[in-house]
Amino acid sequence: MRLVLVGPPGAGKGTQAEFIAAHLAVPKISTGDIFRSNVSQGTPLGVEAKRYMDAGELVPDEVTINMVRDRLAEPDASEGFLLDGFPRTTPQAAALDKLLADLGTALDVVLELVVDDDEVIRRLSGRRTCRGCGKIWHVEFDATTREGICDRCGAELFQRDDDKPETIATRLREYAEKTAPLVDYYGAQGKLVGIDATGPVEDVTVRAIDALRSYGG
Ligand code: ADP
Ligand code: AMP
C-alpha cells in the first residue's frame, strides 16, 4: 500500500505512523526525521534545512522533493510506503503524483488526522522524543515511568527546538496556508479519508486501520 498521512503538526502523525506502518508492513518515511538526522550529522542538506526548521517554516519544495525522490528509489519502498510529513504543499503533491506515475504506480490513499488547534498546542508543548530509538512521548498524555528516560530503550528524551510556543504558532500558520489545501487536492482525486484523531492513541490506531481496510490496507 502507498499511503500518505496528513494533518497539522502535533496531530499524531509520527505516533500513528509507527503502528500503521508495522500493521501494513511498509517502511515509514518521515521527511521531518530525515531532515533532523541531516541536521544532527551536519550535512549540507541539514545546514540548509535547519534555517527553515528553526523558524517553523517549510523547507523549500525543490530541496524536499529531491530528498523524497532519492528515498523512494530505495528498494524497501518499491512495494509500498507510508509518508509522514510529505507532501506538505500542492507542488510537492503534484511532484509526488508525477514521480509515482513515472514508476507506473500511484498513491492508494491519504489519511487525514483531524484534531483542533487547542489540542495540537497541548500536544506539541509536552512532546518529548527519545534520542536512542526515536519513540515519541508526551509529558502528560503518554508519560515515561522515569522522567526524561525512554521506557522502551532507556535512552534520554529531548524536546524538539521547534516545539517552542513562538515556533509552534508559525508552524500552525504554515499548515493552514500551505498544507491544508491538500485536503481538497486529494479529496478531488477521491483518495482522502479523514478520521477523528482525538482520544487515546490506541483508539486512533484502531480508527486508522479500520478506515484503511476499504482501500486494501
Ligand atoms: P506529529 O507527527 O503529527 O507532529 P506526534 O506524533 O509527534 O505528531 O504527536 C505530538 C504529541 O502528541 C506527542 O507528544 C505525542 O505523544 C502526543 N500524542 C499523539 N497522539 C496522541 C493522542 N491520541 N492523545 C494525546 N496525545 C497524543
Ligand atoms: P515534522 O517532523 O514533520 O514536524 O517536520 C519538522 C520540520 O521539518 C518542519 O517544520 C519543516 O521545517 C521541515 N519539513 C518536514 N517535512 C517537510 C516538507 N514536506 N516540506 C517542507 N518542510 C518540511
Image: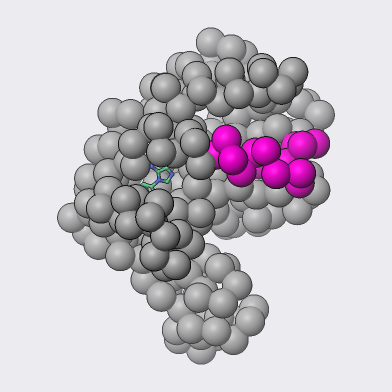
Residue found at x 48% / y 62%: 37
Residue at (45% x, 84% y) in the render: 148
Q: Position of residue 3 (x, y in %)?
A: 66, 34
Give the percent coordinates (x, y) of residue 29. Answer: 60, 47
Residue 78 located within the stretch drawn in magenta:
yes
Frontmost residue, 3 versus 116: 3
Residue 149 at x, y percent in the picture: 51, 85
Residue in front for this viewpoint, 204 or 165: 165
- Residue 167 seen in the current view: yes
Seen from the viewer's position, the closer of residues 12 and 130 is: 130
Q: From the viewer's perspective, is 102 left or right of 79? A: left
Spot occupied by residue 194 in the image (x, y as percentages of width and height): 56, 30
The answer to whether 43 is drawn above or below residue 177 in the figure is: below
User: Magenta residues, as a range?
Assistant: 68-83
Q: Is residue 99 left or right of residue 81?
A: left
Look at the image and say whether residue 2 sits in the magenta stretch.
Answer: no
In the image, residue 84 sits, relative to residue 96, either above or below, namely: below
73 shown above or below 11: above
On-image quarter of the N terminus: top right
> In which quarter of the view is residue 216 placed?
top right
Q: How many marks?
A: 0
Q: Tell me which residue sits at (75%, 53%) in the image.
A: 22
